[in-house]
Image: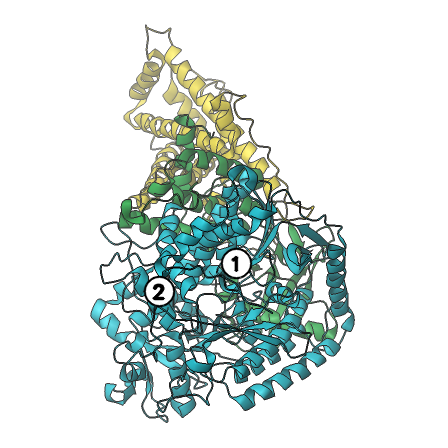
């Protein structure tokens, strides 16, 4: 496989502007002659579909949800970064770029990240104009908060529901285009195959989740905005229906999958309380602004938190990272929590958490101020744990949260399949080995509103005058047959175990061996265990019911089958990378203090994997990363 | 703890439905209502009974996908809480829990506990937006919005679109949902140009699918986001103004 | 939107814009009907309050109240013929009652269509006796209006009915415990109707201000109590012999 990232020439600051000028354009009258399929209608997909519709393209948008407003972007709590420098605290496009590259532990592409920082300011303008009710100060201007991994205050927020408000903004823009007739919206429609004609993506096959009907849809280009794959861990902060299927089916059709082992373990989630649990609930990272993280200095300390005197508490983040303290980046904080719990300092009934304590902040600011900032999060915590965080410190522990890895894309966000684009969390592009807080919303909307709508024109322009293939083209018939075979295959196994029970077992393997800490031995063991469990899955899974009505077990069964294949690739990628960087921590590669030890000489590359068959060794192509504007350095948050 | 479930089962939209009783035994009190259903479904699968179909996604109360009538209350016994965040420590050992789907003409039943809420999307597509094309937005801080208005707009915007308001309303009315979106946009300066056209169109679509408001207040009591019926009053006022001042939808 | 054949079906056709006068179009919408109910409700509520206050003259003796009744017949005389002003009130009130009933009936019918299936189990949180029974108290009041007009305007229950002697007519009617009972029950129904209706009309009219919203409840209670206490006192006064 050849990888060409198509990074424009010229100085970093001018790359995007020059590229926008040099790209081919489709004139306004010709745009309606092109059709574009957008799969996924979360932050990235809805914003892209809406913008393409506004531009005049014929857009078909697909989601497996009953409404675009359900996408898991909605659960993002903390905020969205933008280099507005409204606080006058020294922020700039270059600083946001620099923080993001550094936060990603120098495993992302400079040009992409710089562009992200550039368009971040436009996103805020756009969202405010849409009526997104961001928090404001008493002068009526937009308020900011600070977030992990940054020393400036650049995060825009809407209480603890920023993702919801931004998604609803994009959703409303999308529904406006649906009303205008430029976007055709297909809900309850799950994409199960990408269709290639003459090597280029020309359509998709979808299954209707209410009727089981399998249909083909053709277009000049296909955009995947299908989110991340952290549900491979089963227990994660992802929604129950989040899955890798669309991206994985594209991967099987030839799209390279980049850095699959780069997953983010979010430091502030409610610890697991039992084996029945279906998901882990995130407590926004913004809580770290005012909460202090600590564990009892004595592992055997069984006293209630309030009874432990200051001198016997270990505020370990403040101790180890004095300059960033409780705002150390996610990967750093997560690993520190794991070290504390592994060393026996864990708190709570299962000794699987650390305290996040607001008593100082309540004393300093008063309970009202804290309630105003985090009231809804505190309520949520109480509903789930039956404990009042104003009285008792919260207990938190890291949980899988985000996938930095994803489909490999070039600067234009096109995958290795021409005509197939990938945006938002489903691509690998901007976050390197670790994503900073409040950057996922930024990237999703940057891709959807401000990048893809330009770059897709460059791809489409030379195809003027061509029609998409008819949906009775043999390529569609073949893909439809594949989908039907898979569905019938899953329905006919009739084994003994439920889909969920397999997913839970798979998730445990991935978490134990390819989670916060990884070893060569463990990863090899994980790979063989995954293969064995996958074989068992295809022999022993039980999917009841039929194809023709709503069948949630059947939906899950197809997705878990893909998770099995992805999970194996995650372990392979983690094995390949003999270094520690960002969220990828190989125990063999650490400093004496237990920090990640990067190997820039050998591993400053993007690992792009090609599919060679289930259970076969995938092919590896490396995209070497050049750093011309930032100096590679050991990350230090001390 | 040991519980008994009575669940509405209906295989397809047109098939007749009925209540079925299932034991839910030996379940941890920290499990949520929906996690209990997961466990029961796993057990049903082992017994060869098709699992109960129910909607859910984020399981943290924000996506609005879950929604079920629990013992005659939308989303169950807790105030301002979606079904996915109701945990069993709110119940007593031995309790019987009755689960029914949302029932309203605007929400046709699909299967078991799943209904179709796409009428909500139609209401939004009728005007629940500000018409601003990507890239045409002015600098964000050019238009200050006083904090009180911004906060109130947020309170309205917090709606998760779950449909509990419709389910709880004896008239199957969607006034709380519609007015929340209308109030958010009609309050903010960005929403002014389309204010009255938006109000007329959204109300018209709303009335095609849903009943009318008799000011029972059940919707507010059922709302997981505690959205106030004050917003309904705002919608009523804007609708009246849109008619009286002859601000016609274009 | 979804590729399914079974969309939720709209049960109310969209109003035909531009073909009807704006007022018909407005009344055609459910919100318009609610608005009509609120406006007519205000008219009727104002009337009920004034009617009750006027009738307090019962306690000042036959001369006062009979003179008051005569004065009512003379309103706007001689600009209008005798009883002309009164008839304008009667038409406005009668029209309000008809519109109020028509809108309520049309909304009730539509709401039944919008909510075809019942829950097997339903645990109401916010509804109270007053708002759950609006329909029934409304029907009681409508029947009562007919009875009341027959009784004290047309004199159908009283062979000795005399237009000029309002005082005598009232005492004659209320001396019959059955008739007095009808008045009491009807006024209790009216009280509940006003309690929900007066609060409700603020919502419907959109008279909404967070600082004053809690006063809407107090006002509704006050109106209901004043009207009920005033009106119920009349038959009780006659029955107990305070007025005879």
SS of the residue under disc 2: helix
Q: Horizontal and vertical percent for residue A26?
A: 53, 43
Q: Is residue C221 visible?
A: no
Apparent side of residue A360 relative to residue C205 in the rendered image (left or right): left
Q: Where is residue A638, by image quadrant? A: bottom left
Q: Where is residue C201, by image quadrant? A: top left
Direction right: furthest residue: A492
User: Closer to the camera, B147 or A468?
Assistant: A468
Q: Which residue does the image show at 34% across and 16% down from the upper left?
A: C72
Q: Is residue A624 above or below residue B195?
A: below
Mark 1 residue crowding within 10 angstroms, few (<14) / some (14–19) / many (20+): many
Q: Which chain is green?
A: B
Q: Are marks 1 and 2 on the same chain?
A: yes
Apparent side of residue A19 relative to residue A3 in the rendered image (left or right): left
Q: Is residue B37 above or below residue A590?
A: above
Chain A, chosen colour in render: cyan
Q: Is residue A63 above or below residue A532?
A: above
Mark 2 residue crowding within 10 angstroms, few (<14) / some (14–19) / many (20+): many
Q: Which mark is residue A71?
A: 1
Q: CA distance from mark 1 to mark 2?
A: 27 Å
The chain containing the residue under callout 2 comes to A
User: Closer to the camera, C205 or A446?
Assistant: A446
Q: Which residue does the image show at 33% across and 64% down from the upper left?
A: A96
SS of the residue under disc 1: loop
Q: Which chain is yellow?
A: C
Question: Which of the marked residues, 1 or 2, is nearer the chain's N terminus?
Answer: 1
Which residue is identified by label 2? Answer: A97
């Amino acid at each position: 496989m050849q990888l060409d990232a198509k990074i424009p020439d010229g100085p970093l600051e001018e790359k995007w502007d020059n590229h926008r000028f040099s790209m081919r354009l489709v004139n306004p009258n010709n745009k309606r002659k092109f059709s574009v399929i957008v799969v996924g209608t979360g932050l990235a997909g809805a914003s892209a579909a809406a913008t393409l519709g506004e531009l005049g393209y014929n857009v078909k948008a697909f989601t497996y949800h009953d409404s675009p407003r359900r996408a898991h972007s909605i659960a993002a709590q903390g905020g969205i970064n933008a280099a507005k420098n409204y606080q006058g605290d020294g922020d700039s496009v270059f600083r946001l770029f620099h923080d993001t590259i550094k936060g990603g532990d120098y495993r992302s592409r400079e040009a992409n990240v710089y562009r992200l920082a550039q368009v971040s300011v436009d996103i805020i303008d756009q969202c405010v104009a849409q009526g997104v009710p961001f928090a404001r100060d008493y002068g009526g201007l937009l308020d900011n908060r600070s977030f992990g991994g940054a020393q400036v205050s650049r995060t825009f927020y809407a209480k603890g529901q920023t993702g919801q408000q931004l998604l609803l903004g994009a959703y409303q823009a999308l529904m406006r285009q649906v009303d205008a007739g430029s976007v055709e919206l297909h809900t309850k429609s799950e994409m199960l195959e990408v269709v290639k004609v003459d090597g280029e993506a020309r359509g998709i096959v979808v299954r209707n989740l209410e009727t089981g009907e399998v249909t083909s849809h053709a277009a000049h280009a296909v955009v995947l905005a299908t989110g991340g794959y952290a549900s491979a861990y089963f227990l994660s902060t992802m929604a129950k229906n989040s899955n890798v299927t669309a991206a994985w089916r594209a991967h099987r059709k030839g799209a390279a999958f980049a850095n699959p082992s780069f997953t983010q373990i979010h430091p502030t989630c409610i610890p697991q309380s039992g084996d029945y649990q279906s998901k882990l609930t995130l407590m926004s990272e913004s809580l770290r602004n005012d909460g202090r993280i600590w564990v009892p200095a004595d592992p055997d300390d069984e006293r209630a938190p309030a009874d432990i005197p200051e001198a016997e508490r270990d505020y370990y983040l403040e101790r180890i990272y004095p300059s960033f303290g409780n705002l150390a980046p996610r990967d750093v904080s997560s690993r520190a929590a794991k070290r504390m719990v592994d060393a026996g300092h864990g708190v709570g009934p299962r000794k699987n958490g650390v305290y996040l304590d607001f008593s100082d902040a309540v004393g300093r600011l008063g309970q009202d101020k804290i309630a105003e900032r985090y009231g809804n999060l505190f309520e949520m915590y109480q509903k789930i744990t039956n404990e009042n965080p104003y009285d008792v410190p919260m207990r938190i522990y890291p949980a899988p949260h985000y996938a930095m890895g994803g489909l490999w894309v070039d600067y234009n966000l096109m995958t290795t399949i021409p005509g197939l684009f990938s945006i938002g969390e489903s691509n690998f592009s901007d976050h390197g080995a670790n994503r900073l807080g409040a950057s996922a919303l930024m990237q999703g909307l940057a891709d959807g509103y401000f990048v893809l709508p330009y770059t897709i024109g460059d791809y489409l322009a030379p195809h003027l005058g061509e029609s998409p293939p008819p949906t009775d083209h043999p390529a569609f018939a073949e893909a439809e047959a594949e989908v039907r075979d898979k569905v019938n295959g899953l329905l006919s196994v009739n084994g003994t175990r439920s889909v969920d029970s397999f997913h839970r077992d798979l998730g445990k393997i991935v978490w134990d061996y390819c989670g916060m800490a990884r070893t060569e031995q463990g990863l090899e063991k994980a790979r063989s265990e995954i293969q064995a469990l996958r074989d068992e899955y295809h022999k022993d899974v039980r999917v009841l019911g039929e194809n023709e009505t709503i069948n949630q077990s059947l939906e899950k069964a197809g997705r878990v089958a893909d998770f099995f294949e992805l999970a194996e690739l995650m372990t392979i990628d983690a094995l390949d990378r003999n270094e520690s960087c960002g969220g990828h921590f190989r125990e063999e590669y650490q400093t004496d203090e237990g920090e990640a030890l990067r190997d820039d000489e050998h591993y400053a590359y993007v690992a792009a994997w090609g599919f060679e068959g289930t259970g076969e060794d995938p092919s590896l192509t490396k995209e070497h990363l050049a750093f011309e504007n930032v100096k590679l350095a050991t990350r230090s948050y001390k | 703890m040991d519980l008994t479930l009575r669940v509405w089962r209906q295989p397809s939209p047109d098939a007749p439905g009925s209540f079925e009783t299932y034991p839910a035994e030996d379940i941890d009190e920290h499990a949520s209502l929906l996690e209990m259903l997961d466990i029961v479904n796993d057990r049903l699968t082992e017994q060869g009974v098709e699992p109960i179909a129910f909607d859910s996604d984020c399981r943290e109360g924000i996506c609005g996908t879950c929604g079920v009538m629990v013992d005659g209350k939308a989303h169950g016994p807790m105030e301002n809480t979606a079904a996915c965040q109701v945990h069993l420590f709110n119940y007593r050992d031995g309790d019987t829990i009755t689960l029914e789907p949302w029932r309203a003409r605007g929400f046709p039943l699909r299967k078991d506990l799943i209904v179709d809420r796409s009428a909500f999307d139609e209401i939004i597509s009728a005007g629940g937006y500000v018409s601003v094309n990507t890239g045409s937005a002015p600098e964000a801080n050019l238009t200050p919005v006083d904090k009180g208005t911004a906060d109130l707009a947020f309170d309205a915007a917090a709606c998760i679109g779950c449909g509990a308001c419709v389910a709880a309303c004896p008239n199957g009315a969607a006034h709380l949902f519609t007015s929340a979106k209308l109030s958010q946009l009609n309050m903010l300066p960005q929403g002014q140009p389309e204010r009255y056209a938006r109000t007329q169109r959204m109300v018209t679509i709303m009335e095609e699918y849903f009943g009318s408001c008799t000011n029972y207040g059940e919707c507010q009591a059922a709302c997981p986001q505690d959205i106030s019926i004050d917003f309904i009053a705002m919608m009523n006022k804007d609708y009246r103004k849109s008619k009286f001042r002859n601000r016609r939808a274009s | 939107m979804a590729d399914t054949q079974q969309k939720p079906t709209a049960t109310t056709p969209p109003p035909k814009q531009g073909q009807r006068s704006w007022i018909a179009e407005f009344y055609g919408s459910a919100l318009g009907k609610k608005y009509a109910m609120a406006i007519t409700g205000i008219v009727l509520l104002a009337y009920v309050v004034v009617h009750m206050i006027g009738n307090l003259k019962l306690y000042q003796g036959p001369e006062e109240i009979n003179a008051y009744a005569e004065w009512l017949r003379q309103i706007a005389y001689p600009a209008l013929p005798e009883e002309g002003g009164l008839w304008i009130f009667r038409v406005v009130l009668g029209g309000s009652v008809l519109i109020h009933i028509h809108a309520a009936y049309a909304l009730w019918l539509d709401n039944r269509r919008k909510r075809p299936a019942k829950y097997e189990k339903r645990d109401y949180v916010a509804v109270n006796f007053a708002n759950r029974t609006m329909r029934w108290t409304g029907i009681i009041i409508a029947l009562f209006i007919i009875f009341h007009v027959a009784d004290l305007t047309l004199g159908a229950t009283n062979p000795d009915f005399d237009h000029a002697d309002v005082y005598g007519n009232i005492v004659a009617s209320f001396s019959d415990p059955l008739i007095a009972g009808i008045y009491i029950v009807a006024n209790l129904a009216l009280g509940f109707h006003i309690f929900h209706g007066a609060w409700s009309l603020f919502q419907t009219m959109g008279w909404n201000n967070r600082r004053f919203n809690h006063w809407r409840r107090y006002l509704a209670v006050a109106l209901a109590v004043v009207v009920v206490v005033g009106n119920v006192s009349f038959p009780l006064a006659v029955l107990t012999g305070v007025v005879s």
